[in-house]
Amino acid sequence: MSHIKTFADCHVLEIKVDRAAKLNALSPEMYVDICLALGELDRSPDLRVGLIHAEGKHFSAGIELDKWAPIFAAGGGFPLPEGGIDLFALSGPRCRKPLVMAVQGYAYTWTVEMMLTTDVRIAAEDTRFAMLEVKRGIYPCGGATLRLPQQMGWSNAQRYLLTGDAWSAAESHRTGLVQEVVAPGEQYRAARAVADKIAAAAPLGVSAILKSSRLALTQGEAVAAEHIFDDMTQVMGSEDAQEGVRSFMERREAAFKGR
Amino acid sequence: MSHIKTFADCHVLEIKVDRAAKLNALSPEMYVDICLALGELDRSPDLRVGLIHAEGKHFSAGIELDKWAPIFAAGGGFPLPEGGIDLFALSGPRCRKPLVMAVQGYAYTWTVEMMLTTDVRIAAEDTRFAMLEVKRGIYPCGGATLRLPQQMGWSNAQRYLLTGDAWSAAESHRTGLVQEVVAPGEQYRAARAVADKIAAAAPLGVSAILKSSRLALTQGEAVAAEHIFDDMTQVMGSEDAQEGVRSFMERREAAFKGR
Amino acid sequence: MSHIKTFADCHVLEIKVDRAAKLNALSPEMYVDICLALGELDRSPDLRVGLIHAEGKHFSAGIELDKWAPIFAAGGGFPLPEGGIDLFALSGPRCRKPLVMAVQGYAYTWTVEMMLTTDVRIAAEDTRFAMLEVKRGIYPCGGATLRLPQQMGWSNAQRYLLTGDAWSAAESHRTGLVQEVVAPGEQYRAARAVADKIAAAAPLGVSAILKSSRLALTQGEAVAAEHIFDDMTQVMGSEDAQEGVRSFMERREAAFKGR
């Protein structure tokens, strides 16, 4: 039985890490299952946003190192399955739908690295973040070396990466890593509320934002600027753009269809 | 009569959005007028810094969508006039002089996008920032997809871009989007004080800073590092560099001439 | 006698600026000496981390401008010595070991610029940071134009670069420039504590982190992502990786050897 549960509801695909008895330690099989769920989210026209969360007091204490050691030693990268999308966003295409993530308790190593690939993050007050690799004789290979300095600031990130020290939810909020800190137990609900708002927004607009923002991040402002108007013309011609104007005139919430 | 007023004084070009009766909604004509004012600021040897502010309780509730819809649908970009500089800094050259901006009340859509092209920003406590596009069936095409993640942090920006939710002046300060939050009504004065300081600084130094910082942002550290000393040699040979040393020795404020 | 003192102890190379009588003004000779110390840190297999600090109430009030003026005017860049590593990280290779820095009192011009090349920074509460160049008729040529916007945020950085205004330790902490603010006099001790933690971490992991993070910063995520697994394979095969697993099983601190 898989330790990754999925549940689709009102355009939101929930992806739950469900192995609390082992502190949600990530096995290679769980990696594969999350990647497949992200692939489903990406392809399904009815799904608009993903919500990643975890059962239990802790998001995850880390990876099952003995299972992963031969994979790391072999050097071929992560075991990305056919039809899946790499949860570390290091190889293959990115998921074109936004991801929201809720964390609590231990949020160690791969938890931080997956978080760095998501778009909105909510943390319980009791969350303890850490990149422990340098204390174990190894180093982070799931993207933290790339994205923690980019998202938290160079020296804020190195202060934790180079020592292996843990940091708090408040520190994550201060440095821009999470957007909201809530009481323990409330993180799923708060994250679902954000996911529902994104699901209610115009899907063509949402995917154009992600595409343009990623282009700017990876290829720079000038390249992204060139593509802004191509996408705008398409979005302006959509049924949803007309619904947007109508709903504004009629002073009601818009009901978007993604076309 | 134009809704954009300009006023030059002590090396500062003030650019005022003056259409409070319509909540300073941006028409295509106002876009053109701001671009022309930026062009004048860029070319005039006597002008050293621009100050953008708005009349009334709100900076702007957004754009006049019905006037802009055909322009967006046509897909040719913004109607940048001859001799003007794009206020969204998406096409054509950038203004070589720094920009300071003061915002209050509603600071919606294009307000945020123009702000992202400026160099110092002051907000009144009552400012409400929002990128509302995904609630209207469209998406932001004035640069927020490029620059909000870059300046506010990836997930802080996506949290607002993907939902259309508003955020406060305090949140803008926390995330680095504005440098100072002041009592409502004080934003113009506070911004003018910063503009006056920049106007009193050595103009060759100021323009060399902007040039070097933009080069680093768009082409990377290595390219920018190569040009630092070329510019320094020129600046060191200027009359202002001598005045800088003299005024320091004589313990007085320097009077710079920009040559 | 040199105004730069070095002291090696438990894998940490301390580099002390020791010219308090002249407010630690940086002469060209001191520049050379710091570069040589960084070269030694980089080459010596026994040294794992550098700690930069300064004697006296102030880190430094700036550079000895009369000594530097002819060097700047000549335009050939900084006088980087054979075997040295540029303390401004503008030319030549970077130091492959991490740097921790402690500042207090005046932390002007080159102090900020050196800080921007380090990986963890501690400030005393009384620290006053400033980039004064535009008040002296010149402009910053030690990397602040490149790195202050990158590390502090565009408009936070320009607010100080373009005016020459000073800012506080609290503002540096808020904007991500320093990681910890301590009582005056405690900055060396706090920085040494961080340096000792880095020295206790796995040296191969530490250097792989710096290498990967710098690659991402200078060449982008995609290039850095390609190299993550090459380095991981090497690190996984090290003695330290085995010691990491063993020490974890035996619930004790690991003793790493850097091989």
Image (cartoon, coloured by chain):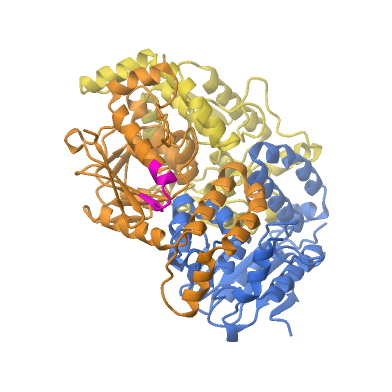
Chain colours: A yellow, B orange, C blue
Instruction: Give the quadrant of residue A117.
Output: top right
Q: Position of residue B221 (x, y in %)?
A: 63, 49
Q: Quadrant of the N terminus of chain B?
A: top left
Which is more toward the observer, B174 or C249? Answer: B174
Q: Position of residue B183 (x, y in %)?
A: 23, 56
Instruction: Identify whether B5 is placed above or below B242.
Output: above
User: Can residue B92 be found in the magenta stretch?
Assistant: no
Labels in figure, total: 0
Which is more toward the observer, A5 or C23? Answer: C23
Which is more toward the observer, A168 or C190? Answer: C190
Drawn side of residue A189 relative to residue A161, left or right: left
Instruction: Identify whether C75 is placed above or below C230.
Output: below
Drawn side of residue B142 relative to residue C109, left or right: left
Instruction: Identify whether A194 is placed above or below C59.
Output: above
Instruction: Read off the magenta span.
Output: B40-50
Instruction: Give the quadrant of residue A259.
Output: top left
User: Can residue B43 be found in the magenta stretch?
Assistant: yes
Instruction: Give the quadrant of residue C201.
Output: bottom right
Residue at coordinates 65% horizontally, 57% vertically from top-left?
Answer: B229
Drawn side of residue C118 relative to residue B58, left or right: right
Residue at coordinates 60% horizontally, 33% vertically from top-left?
Answer: A87
| Residue C13 seen anywhere in this rendered image of the structure | no
Q: Position of residue A123 (x, y in %)?
A: 45, 45
| Residue C82 seen anywhere in this rendered image of the structure | yes
